Image: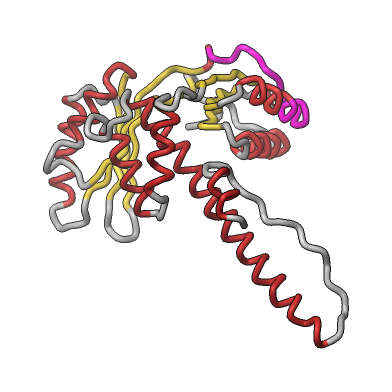
Amino acid sequence: MNPLLLARRLWLPTHPARHRAFHSCPAWLSGHNKWSKIEKAKGANDMKKGMLYSRAYREIALAVRSGGSADPDQNHVLAAVLKRSKTQGVPKENIETALKKISGENGKGDTHLVFEVMGPGSVGLIVECLSDNPNRTVKFLNTLLKDNGARMADVKFLFKREGRVRVALEPGEDMEARFEHLVGVGLDADAEDFDHDDQPDGTRYVEFKCPQTSLHKLTSAVTAPGVCRELLTSELVYAPLEPLEELDDTSSAALDKLVDAIEDLDDTLRVWTAADT
């Protein structure tokens, strides 16, 4: 792919070019097959990079919104996202461009959009988008909903806003003592509930839930020196107010298909459903 063209599509997923099927050919043309394979591999690699850059852009945008600042020194969430993006190989130039665009430094800040959707099985969905062209986003989303048996509808009453903070604890023999200390710190900082998940390498992921007004307080408390290894996520979510009755197989499959399709839109940040736990 032309480097200039790739740069222009900095944050958009790219798609591998279609190639004509090759038929039997003389030996002197066999090199065409070789270069076709090379181009195909390059196209697949470009697509993976495009998806990585697009995902990084979304995560940076969410971090800026939830942390309230485009300065990583003032935003714990953003600092964690930037560190992870760099580790994954996202170029510094891409990160700087994203921060400028999201914060509106280039005069063309994106618009944050929230859509309410009634999906298959009468399941409510909240769709968060970030777009430089809201009319385009609405058009694409409406077409997608129509094709998947869904529609725009008032469903926000099915959800509540809630803060969620996820951190990691280092493996070690004193895990339980450090876990108990972390939980105590979280509860003192307005956490209402918590859960944990142990990883194969011994790392323990701990997630806290809190009122939306306490998100910053909780995040600062559990990421203080000596409390945890690292911050994984800190965000405001749309959580279902009531547990949803189990869907039948047909509705469940249709809902999964719809969510996947919405998440594939370039402008989509997050999709929340009333079926989430």
Residue at 63%, 66% in the rendered image: 41
What is the tally of numbered marks visible in this picture?
0
Residue segment shown in magenta: 143-156
Specify how the rendered protein is coloured.
secondary structure
Residue at 70%, 36% in the rendered image: 254
* Quarter of the figure with residue 226: top left
* Quarter of the figure with residue 231: top left
Residue at 70%, 77% in the rendered image: 34
Horizontal arrangement in the rendering, residue 150 relative to residue 194 (left or right): right
- Residue 55's x, y, as percent? 49, 43
Is-magenta flag for residue 112? no
Q: Is residue 255 visible?
A: yes
> Relative to the observer, which residue lies in front, 106 or 168?
106
Q: Residue furthest front?
A: 4
Q: Is residue 120 visible?
A: no
- Residue 125's x, y, as percent? 59, 24
The quarter of the image holding the N terminus is bottom right
Horizontal arrangement in the rendering, residue 29 relative to residue 99 (left or right): right
Horizontal arrangement in the rendering, residue 3 relative to residue 148 (left or right): left
Residue at 15%, 45% in the rendered image: 178
Is-magenta flag for residue 155? yes
Against 273, residue 15 (above or below) is below
Against 207, residue 116 (above or below) is above
- Residue 222's x, y, as percent? 20, 35
Against 175, residue 206 (above or below) is above
Horizontal arrangement in the rendering, residue 202 relative to residue 86 (left or right): left
> Relative to the observer, which residue lies in front, 164 or 179?
164
- Residue 223's x, y, as percent? 20, 37
